[in-house]
Image (cartoon, rainbow, N blue to C red):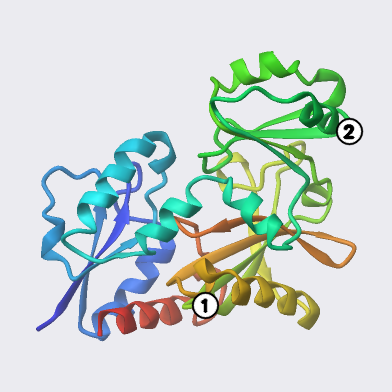
Amino acid sequence: MKKRIALITWSGLPQGAESERLMLPYLAAAGIKAEIVDWRSVDCDFGRFDLLILRTCWDYHLNAKEFTAWLQRTVKVVPVLNAIETVLWNHNKFYLRELQQQGHQIAPTVFVCETEPIEAGQWNEVLRWEKIVVKPAVSATAHKTWLFDRATLPDKDELKHKMQDEALLIQEFIPEIVTGGELSFIYIDGRYSHAVLKRAAAGDFRVQKDFGGTAEPFTPSRELLNQADEIAATVPQVRDSLYCRIDAGLRESKLLLMELELIEPELFLGLAEGAAERFAKAIVRRTE
């Protein structure tokens, strides 16, 4: 019997992104019937699918409680990838604190829980930085992400109010992201597939396409790839997932981990020869 899968999107992208559309012929050739479905569709019986793949659900952070409830409800009737445990771990950027404790290098970061004030010691650390990035712990596509100079940074109480008392991350700005770009290493079934270099538009610090950012194919050196592979091998959420995008800055030839994207990352399948077919084959293996 032909397997049926759903590639999960959101209402703002009903046909999915280019990466998803590129996969469809390969899935069809393997006997897989794939549909692109909005996760908030009230008319869809998700139980009729054999597998759901979270792909372009790019509004999940705006509806975090609803999305989590949908996941918990849906996984009872159909398998979801990436795994719900990984998604729930990854949706709050406090996972970076866990990775830092495991020895992975991240941008200097102060983690502030929603119910707690910013402590004096934390604030003193922040005030040592020339530029500061502030972002919600649950966020995507640079939503509510702010860049301040030290001189223009609001005081800590005003900052908490500005962030509407959400859990937040206060990070030292990494200038190499602007001067050299951000690297993204895409892993499929825990194995390296391809990489891209993302650059911010002139005058901006955000590399996302929504803000004028660009992406281009990138061939990493063996040294850089070894560093990315070490992250992939030592973080089980990367090693065991269908897909992951490792985002990193480059400082003195060392990767500085910015994010692990395990929920709905753009995988840039159109920028690497064979990537769409590799991802489609990985999905097929998960249906066998």
Going from N to C along the chain, the mark reached first, 2 or 1, is 2
Q: Residue at x 14, y 42 (%)?
A: 42
Which quarter shows the N terminus? bottom left
- Image position of 108 with respect to 22: above or below: above
> In the displayed structure, would residue 152 be above or below residue 241?
above
Q: Front-most of 57 and 91?
A: 91
Q: Nearer the viewer, residue 66 or 284?
A: 66
Q: Where does residue 109 sit, x and y in percent of width and height?
A: 73, 42
Q: Which mark identifies residue 130?
A: 2
**Pointer 2: residues within 10 angstroms few (<14), some, or many (20+)?**
few
* Front one among 287 and 127: 127
**Where does label 1 land, which residue?**
190
Mark 1 Cα-neighbour bin, 10 Å: few <14, some 14–19, many ≥20:
many
**Residue 9 point in image, percent of width and height:** 33, 52
- Location of the C terminus by quadrant is bottom left
> What separation in Å lies between label 2 and label 1 (alpha carbons)?
37 Å
Could one spot residue 283 in this view of the protein? yes
Quadrant of residue 149 within the rendered picture = top right
Q: Position of residue 89 (x, y in %)?
A: 47, 53
Q: Say which element carries label 1.
A: loop
Seen at 11% across and 46% down, the residue is 43
Q: Position of residue 267 (x, y in %)?
A: 51, 64
Q: Amino acid at mark 1?
A: Gly
Nearer-the-camera pick, 99 or 59: 99
Q: Residue at x 79, y 27 (%)?
A: 123
Type of the residue with mark 2: Glu
